[in-house]
Image (tube, helix red, strand yellow):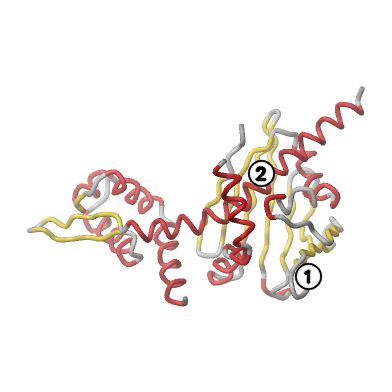
Amino acid sequence: MVQHSERLDAAFAALSDATRRGVLEQLGRADASITELADKFGMTLTGMKKHVGVLEDAGLVATAKVGRVRTCTLGERRLEEVTAWIDRYRQLWSARFEELDLVLEDMKRKKKEQSR
Amino acid sequence: MKNETKVERISENEVVITRTFDAPAQLVFEAWTKPELMRRWWVPRSMGMTLLACELDVRTGGTYRFVFPSEPEPMAFFGRYLEVTPHSRLVWTNDEGGQDAGQVSTLTLEERGETTRIVLHERFPSREATDAGMGAYDGMPESFAQLDEILAG
């Protein structure tokens, strides 16, 4: 459980950066080498290596070296784990806000009636 | 059409929720500050429970208290209002974990024409508390199953 929570923390830290989220989106479409990712995001190779390292530590990305090229792929299961967790929080708030929509409709209607 | 509820974890201990409502800021603010209105939406019907108590003393330094039915005894959530600026800003603490726990929620309302955009910023005292806070609803798997069905439908 603790281990699970730590991994989740690492995943969230990894996702707190816009470039890293972009990298995940990109890898969701197709595998890419670190060089390709660096070009795509207008970064140095060293900078991109760091980002990929953080994502890899969090288990969100897996890399494999073939010859001289390191190819990055999505660590699919972990990403689902992270999104499932935040989705649950979002579900509660969407449900609350849908009820709030109804309350507000009701308030608007009453106000209209009063002003007649 | 339903407006989208966006939830983002912006740091290890902060979560930001944004949503737009088709009503003026005054009404949205009232819905967050009048007990008889708040109790109608704070616990969505899909959760299959009603609040036992919803007491709000909305003024700077005032307190609030929600009581949920629970076994073996009811569960209370309470805290204090740190800032109350009608129709634009509401700041409150969540003190079940102790007054020093430092969980602070900041609601800002911004009227845009006929609609109001709200930003709810929740700051938890620690990364661990954020995880726990976001997982606080794990204890209600049945109601969430119901919710899933509703959302899927």
Q: Which residue is mark 1?
A: B74
Report which quarter residue A108 is drawn in. top right
Q: Amino acid at mark 1?
A: Pro
Percent x, y for residue B136? Answer: 62, 65
- Nearest to N terminus: mark 1 or mark 2: 1
Compared with B126, B15 (above or below) is above
Q: Is residue A2 left or right of residue A70?
A: right
Percent x, y for residue A32? Answer: 21, 49
Locate the C terminus of chain B and report the quarter of the image it occupies. Answer: top right
Q: A24 and B146: which one is in front? A: B146
Distance of mark 1 from mark 2, alpha carbons?
Answer: 30 Å
Compared with A52, B152 (above or below) is above
Report which quarter residue B144 is drawn in. bottom right
User: Subunit of mark 2?
Assistant: B
Percent x, y for residue A16? Answer: 44, 57
Query: Circle 2 sits in a helix, a strand or a loop, which is it?
Result: strand
Residue sitting at x 89%, y 27%:
A113
Compared with A13, B84 (above or below) is above
Percent x, y for residue A103? Answer: 77, 40
Q: Which residue is mark 2?
A: B118
Q: Amino acid at mark 2?
A: Ile
Residue sitting at x 43%, y 63%:
A13
Residue sitting at x 11%, y 58%:
A66
Specify the farthest residue to the left. A67
Residue sitting at x 39%, y 61%:
A14
